[in-house]
Amino acid sequence: MKVYFVSLAAGVLVGIIYALLQVRSPAPPAIALIGLLGMLIGEQVVPTVKRLVAGEPVTAAWFRSECVPKITGAPPKADGAADAPVTLAARGKEGGQ
């Protein structure tokens, strides 16, 4: 039940911000998508700050493996996996065609 109240509070906060920025709700698609991107990026601030406070390094490799997949929705790559381009032929083999 707590998650519903948090969600409602976040929605009210966004509604207040929209009113202050004089953006109608629901927002036009471009504004809404940029807002969603900001939310995804903002979610990664907390783990990054926790890592810095704990004295652990925040490296590009860590960011790529931990944060980028959560922002882009792409599955994380296995350690040491090469960036092999995906071709249509490769997709056909993977899909069992």
Image (spheres, grey):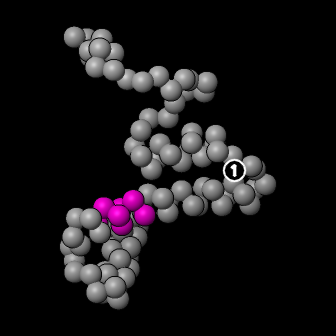
Q: Mark 1 points at which residue?
A: 58
Picture layout, residue 94 above or below residue 69: above
Question: Is 68 one of the magenta-colored residues?
Answer: no
Corner quadrant of residue 74:
top left
Determine the residue positioned at 29% across, 69% down. Answer: 31
Please state the horizontal and vertical placement of residue 3, each as a whole percent of the image.
39, 64
Residue 29 visible somewhere in the drawing: yes
Residue 94 visible somewhere in the drawing: no
Please state the horizontal and vertical placement of residue 92, each as a whole percent of the image.
26, 15
Corner quadrant of residue 9:
bottom left
Please state the horizontal and vertical placement of residue 35, each as a whole percent of the image.
36, 66
Q: What stretch is highlighted in magenta?
A: 32-38
Please state the horizontal and vertical placement of residue 87, each as a whole percent of the image.
33, 20
Determine the residue positioned at 46% across, 47% down. Answer: 70
Q: Classify residue 89 as left or right of residue 42.
A: left
Picture layout, residue 17 above or below residue 61: below
Residue at the right extreme of this rendering: 55
Q: Which amino acid does label 1 sit on?
A: Val
Q: How crowded is mark 1: few (under 14 residues within 10 Å), some or many (20 or more)?
A: few
